Image: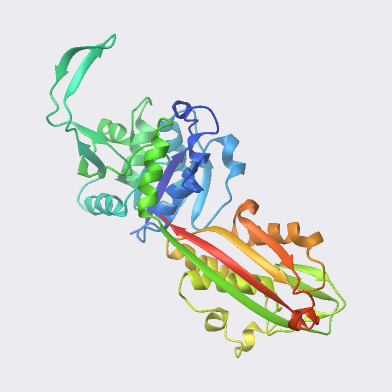
């Protein structure tokens, strides 16, 4: 059973107040869009994510594991249609259509929708209306409405892919959501339990509530890494992914990039998964001379598979020479590129040991690193 998530993120969100569209704003240390995507990346049933962005925003998103991007349309329905058409080239069996502005989605809601689709062509989460309903005008109550049988709709709204694609192709447009389009095509839509935490960020004050929810759910891990390599013959050293000219090289089984090794071990440490030697034994000849970015990408992929997002990296290089300052910004950009991070989330700095110890005697280079992982 192939299941895809379609995340609608092409809107401008003007009701959320001035500033960038709400999906690009920070929420509890990450962008709203990052929280939402992480929910589906952590869902073991979901093998593919189609992200629908405004054409102006496509360049603002860095592609990541199992995420594809397509341009949306002038309305929500048009954006969903664009996402469905993009998926149609390799159609899934089921599709979960979700609003990017619902970053606090609990996993049980995803599970309930998928389970319901085993016996129905459509399923969507909702909460029964429990408050009294008034009709009003000019700030005064003018009448009452019966709340019996009324629900507050949520997403993801799930469907058998072929059925919802046909429904969208046949629909004239102007629907409130995909359930309306499905029902217009005669599809049954099963109601499954929603969740109070699954709020949709609409107004500026909703950010504070979402932050409280995420703050209570986050799994935050810190890992520390330390590595040392001695100098040997050579004309450059590999440090933090770049070749730095030097009158000696660093010795090691791989390319001896002490900076990337420390960062890699920091990520493994945050995951409680040992160190580089456990995953890439130095006794294995296939890793002789290997680029250290292979190790770093492996650690980052393990973090993502467990539902973690890399929040930030801090690396300190300890040496008398070569001078790190002229290369620090390039190192920062290279690490960010390897990990798919914003460079502003990567720190590279250097210090000396005041001519003390093996680094002071210029016998080698040491590195320390800290990695922060966050799981919503």
Residue at 52% over, 40% down = 24
Pick the quarter of the image with the C terminus.
Answer: bottom left
Closer to the camera, 372 or 42?
A: 372
Closer to the camera, 178 or 227?
A: 227
- Return the x and y of residue 183 as percentages of the image width and height: 25, 33
Residue lying farthest bottom? 283
Closer to the camera, 328 or 162?
A: 328
- The image quadrant of residue 169 is top left
How many numbered discs, if any? 0
- Return the x and y of residue 186 as percentages of the image width and height: 23, 34
Closer to the camera, 237 or 64?
A: 237
- The image quadrant of residue 136 is top left
Residue at 49% over, 41% down = 52
Residue at 48% over, 36% down = 22
Pick the quarter of the image with the N terminus.
Answer: bottom left
- Return the x and y of residue 172 as percentages of the image width and height: 37, 25
Q: Is residue 88 visible?
A: no
Residue at 78% over, 69% down = 243
- Return the x and y of residue 68 as percentages of the image width and height: 51, 50
Residue 103, above or below 181: below
Image side of residue 278 versus residue 203, left or right: right
Residue 39, above or below 190: below
Scheme by which the image is coloured: rainbow
Residue 363, above or below 201: below
């Amino acid at each position: 059973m192939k299941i895809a998530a379609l995340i609608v993120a092409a809107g401008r969100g003007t009701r959320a107040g001035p500033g960038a569209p709400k999906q690009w704003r920070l929420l509890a240390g990450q962008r709203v869009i990052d929280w939402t995507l992480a929910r589906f990346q952590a869902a073991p049933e979901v093998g593919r994510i189609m992200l629908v962005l405004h054409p102006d925003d496509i360049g603002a998103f860095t592609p990541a594991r199992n995420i594809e991007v397509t341009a949306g349309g002038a309305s929500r329905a048009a954006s969903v249609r664009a996402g469905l058409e993009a998926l149609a080239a390799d159609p899934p069996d089921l599709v979960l259509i979700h609003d990017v502005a619902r970053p606090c989605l609990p996993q049980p809601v995803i599970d309930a929708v998928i389970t319901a689709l085993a016996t129905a062509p459509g399923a969507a989460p909702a909460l029964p209306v429990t408050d009294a309903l008034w009709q009003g005008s000019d700030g005064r109550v003018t009448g009452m409405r019966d709340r019996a049988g009324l629900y507050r709709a949520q997403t993801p709204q799930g469907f058998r892919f072929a059925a919802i694609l046909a429904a969208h192709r046949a629909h004239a447009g102007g629907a409130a959501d995909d359930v309306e389009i499905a029902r217009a095509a005669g599809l049954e839509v099963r109601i499954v339990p929603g969740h109070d935490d699954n709020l949709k960020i609409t107004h500026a004050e909703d950010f504070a509530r979402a932050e409280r929810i995420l703050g209570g759910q986050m799994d935050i891990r810190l890992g520390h890494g330390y590595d040392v390599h001695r100098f040997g013959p050579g004309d450059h050293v590999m440090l933090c992914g770049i070749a730095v000219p030097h009158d000696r090289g660093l010795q090691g089984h791989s390319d001896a990039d002490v900076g990337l090794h420390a960062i890699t071990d920091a990520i493994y440490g945050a995951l409680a998964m040992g160190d580089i030697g456990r995953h890439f034994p130095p006794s294995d000849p296939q890793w002789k001379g290997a680029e250290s970015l292979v190790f770093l990408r492996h650690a980052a992929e393990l973090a993502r598979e467990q539902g973690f997002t890399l929040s930030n990296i801090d690396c300190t290089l300890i040496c008398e020479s070569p001078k790190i300052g002229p290369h620090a910004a390039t190192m920062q950009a290279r690490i960010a590129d390897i990990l798919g991070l914003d460079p502003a989330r990567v720190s590279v700095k250097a210090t000396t040991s005041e001519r003390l110890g093996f680094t002071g005697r210029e016998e080698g280079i040491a590195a320390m690193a800290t990695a922060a992982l966050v799981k919503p």
